[in-house]
Image (cartoon, coloured by chain):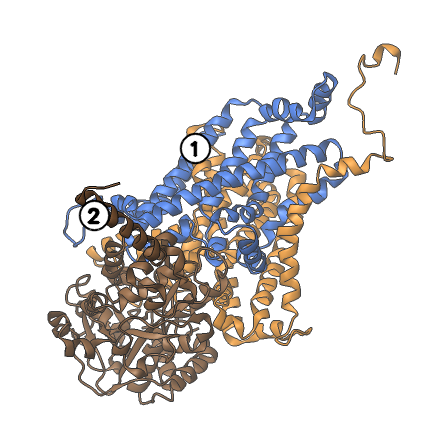
Chain colours: A brown, B orange, C blue
Amino acid sequence: MKLSSPVRQLGLAAIAFVLVAACGGTSSAPASCSAKTATSVADCGGIDSLYAAAKAEGALNVIALPLDWANWGEIIPAFKAKYPGIKVNSANPQGSSQEEIDAINQLAGTKDAPDVVDVGMKVMLANTQLFAPYKVATWSDIPAAQKEASGVWFQDYGGYMGIGYDPTKVPGGTLNSISDLLGSGFKSKVALAGDPTISNQALNGVIMIAVANGGSLDDVAKGVDFFKSLKAAGNFVPVKGTIATIKSGQTPVLVEWDYLSAAHVKDVPGWKIFVPANATIGGYYAQGISKGAPHPAAARLWEEFLYSDQGQNLFLKGYARPVRMDAMVKSGRVDATAAAALPKVSGTPLFPSQAQSAAASAYLSSKWAQAIA
Amino acid sequence: MTSAGEPAVDPAARPVRGGRGLPLTWLGVTPFFVYVGLFLVLPSLIIGSGSFTGKDGGLSLENLSDIQKPYIARALINSITVSIASALAGAIAGALLAYAVATGNPHGVLRRTVTSASGVLAQFGGVTLAFAFIATMGTIGFVTLFLKDHGIDIFANGVWLYELSGLTLVYTYFQIPLMVLVFLPALDGIRPQWREATESLGGNTWHYWRCVAGPLLAPAFLGCTLLLFANAFSAYATVAALITQGSIVLPLVISNLFTSETGRAQPGLAKALALAMIVIVAIVMLLYTLLQRRTSRWLR
Amino acid sequence: MTRSRRVKLQLFRGAVFLVLGAFVLAPIAAMFEFSTRGTKVDSPRTLVAWTNIVNTPDLIDAIVASLELAAITSIAMLVLLLPTMVWVRLRLPSLNRIVEFLCLLPLTIPAIALVVGLYPISRWMRINVSDSILMLSIFYLVIVLPYSYRALDAGLSAIDVKTLSEAARSLGAGWGTVMLRVIVPNMSSAILNAGLLSVAVVLGEYTFANLLNYQNLQVAIAYVGQVSAGTSIAVSVASLLFAFALLMILSFAGRGRAR
């Protein structure tokens, strides 16, 4: 049969289209992305394929992400806006690092188990067997010392430990040294943001106090002694410091990360932070993808988002130092205004090593409960 | 029975087979016993056996001896102290309130309102009560600010709301309604004839309370106080929401052990502490039951 | 009663109601006051904390879950307890003491202690049966046993179960009809009492949910309370008023039945 030229071209195009669609069809179907074992986005066939798989899962379980902490309050909605169709279930927002690990263990095998965690280094290193290796697209930008070689854990943001306070509640309006805290004007005013035997922030808080009080990164006993004196003087208030307790004035002096103090200025106008010059303790948090995550594709998509320029800049907006900061400054993709607004650090930063954190934690397990009883 | 007295139709007969019909009749209560066995007896056995299991899995008393650890012992003593204090305060105030209600109209609106309110407020523990007290007497609470405006700073020496004294005050809040609920029936058992008899024998109010109503109500009062003690001793939610740092009382020590890092070191410790709590409350409740039996002899 | 004694009694009653009434009502008034505060000290009163309740999806989910748990627990309690108690009264009176003891046993086991033993059972069930929060109702049934038993026992004692059931059976009724159409209507106020008490207990329960990693109403209030005290207090007041309304209904509904 003799077809007219346009019809034959159309027919050839149609046949070609069908052939291409048939061949390329499998790579865009979600079923091909075995997210559970994917160690990089390439394993999943690209970010779109990963998103499709995540959308098919429909949800993401995160845990212990307070909205006022390093800007999670903006990051979670930004993730939902960029990848619609994935419901983010945020459990136990004020939970501690240890409680995140407990949730993985206690909820293992159920649909409520956390997919991803954001924990302190000491807890992460003690539980690496729970996490699946994964390298985000921007893996090479993360300094070698801040990630595990095979991708089991990778740090996300960090800051320095300080003492945030409301100047109107502090005698004299400023805090100049930690020994001020033992004064009579601080009755029931000083708090920790958690229990140092389970919370990474509180652990680093005690380490900072220890170093400021004449101890060292290896010797946290002076820190425990300081809190014991604080309790004896009636200055230690046995309330976990949170955004609500700051706003309600229950904890006008709080040992916390500098990025949190900077964020609290909008809740308590005039909120200041004091970082002892001789005890500038820095710490980074780490991300991990649970091996038994109920939503493996969504978990990996989340990590890709956090380590993208958008995600890292959102951390920066929350006054925390993102782990890819140096690389982003070099590439010019960093949010310059946010970078300029970071809390200033005057002393020499000290980072507790893994062994030092573990030793401090072990000491606290046996001595803390007694000291503040 | 004569033929006239015999029923025209046979009443429901017991099943004929199986002797006294045991198998089929027992089937009726099986679901209840299975449920109670699984969810009440089994956990108790888990607690009991776990308390005596050492770190290595063998039989040992180390969990129980750990109760001597200073901070645990202090938590136990604090628990007992707060429970006694709030039980006494709640018992006295609650008894007065119950008496004020009992002497009123038994079908009146006042009585119904007070008993309903007591029913709700006795359950009003936990998180909501802690927040209520923070809203009332916290650093920027309603009462605190009101008193501050009038020159009285109740927290001049530290915020005692988060110490044992504050906890006692908060506990008393739900102890009073509970006392009203459990003591009111005893007060209803007082007969006006006793008052008349006392007066006819020449006694006055003092004699009445000292020699007649007092001794009769004493077992009930004591029993209800014990109930209040057990109630405060077992309370967890209120203190967990109020004092969020440290373990000032025993329930907080137990809940902190649920976090695996602290609990993993000694898996049997939580169970041993749970066992200690159960034993203490069981003894108190036993005394309560005995006192109730004495009460019911006179105040039916 | 002499006049002076009457006066003294009324003075005493007045004083007691005034003092204790103030003590009891102060925190509730304070909660209303706190939840309507503006952001700054001199800001006008606002209902932001209350509208926030609707805007917090976690809170809404938790409220719905708790209401479902309350309904399931009350119904399960009636289904488990009422037939058992009737059966024991009719057929196995020797078991009366044992059933009473078992039902009042949860009063001697503090919830915080019981949950230590329930934890392994809960984990097993969560993995092998279902991980829905509604599984909590199985554990809540234990907690409501004492209150429900007392309420149902009072109701059963007031009616002559034996005669009623024998009369019904003699007229040809099956056990289902005896239960549903003879016994239940005769003790409706006791059943209502037991049901509403169960609802109040379940709505106020925190210990089991918190330590078994479930998010019910009280747990959600605690979480919200760590972020925004105003909203959590608004929810607390709401739940308190709800429970109060339930129990007021109960006291007025129970009035109709003559003993």
**B44 or A178: which is nearer to us?**
B44
Residue occupying image coordinates x 46% and y 66%:
A102
Image location of residue B155, percent across then percent down: 29, 63
Q: Amino acid at mark 1?
A: Met
Residue at mark 2: A9
A341, above or below C216, in the image: below
As helix, strand or loop, the secondary structure at mark 2 comes to: helix
Secondary structure under the numbered disc 1 in the rendered image = helix
Please give the chain letter of the residue carrying mark 2: A
- Which corner quadrant holds the C terminus of chain B? top right
- Disc 1: which chain? C
Q: Which mark is residue B124?
A: none
Image coordinates of residue C140 in percent, x first then y, are 53, 47
Viewer-side residue, B16 vs C145: B16
Q: Residue furthest front?
A: A1
Can residue C64 be seen in this snapshot? yes
Tag 1 and tag 2 share a subunit? no
Pointer 1: what residue? C248
Residue lying farthest to the top in this orientation: B4
Amino acid tagged 2: Gln
Characterize the local packing of mark 2: few (<14), some (14-19) or many (20 or more) Cα atoms within 10 angstroms.
Answer: few
Q: Is residue A182 left or right of residue A195?
A: left
Residue C164 x %, y %? 69, 22
Q: As rendered, which of A52 and C128 lies closer to the eye?
A: A52
Q: Position of residue C245 (x, y in %)?
A: 40, 34
Query: Considering only vertical position in the picture, is C83 above or below A357?
Result: above
Name the mark nearer the viewer: 1 or 2: 2
In the image, residue A277 sits, relative to residue A274, either above or below, namely: below
Q: Is residue B21 left or right of residue A98?
A: right
Circles 1 and 2: CB atoms closer than 8 Å? no
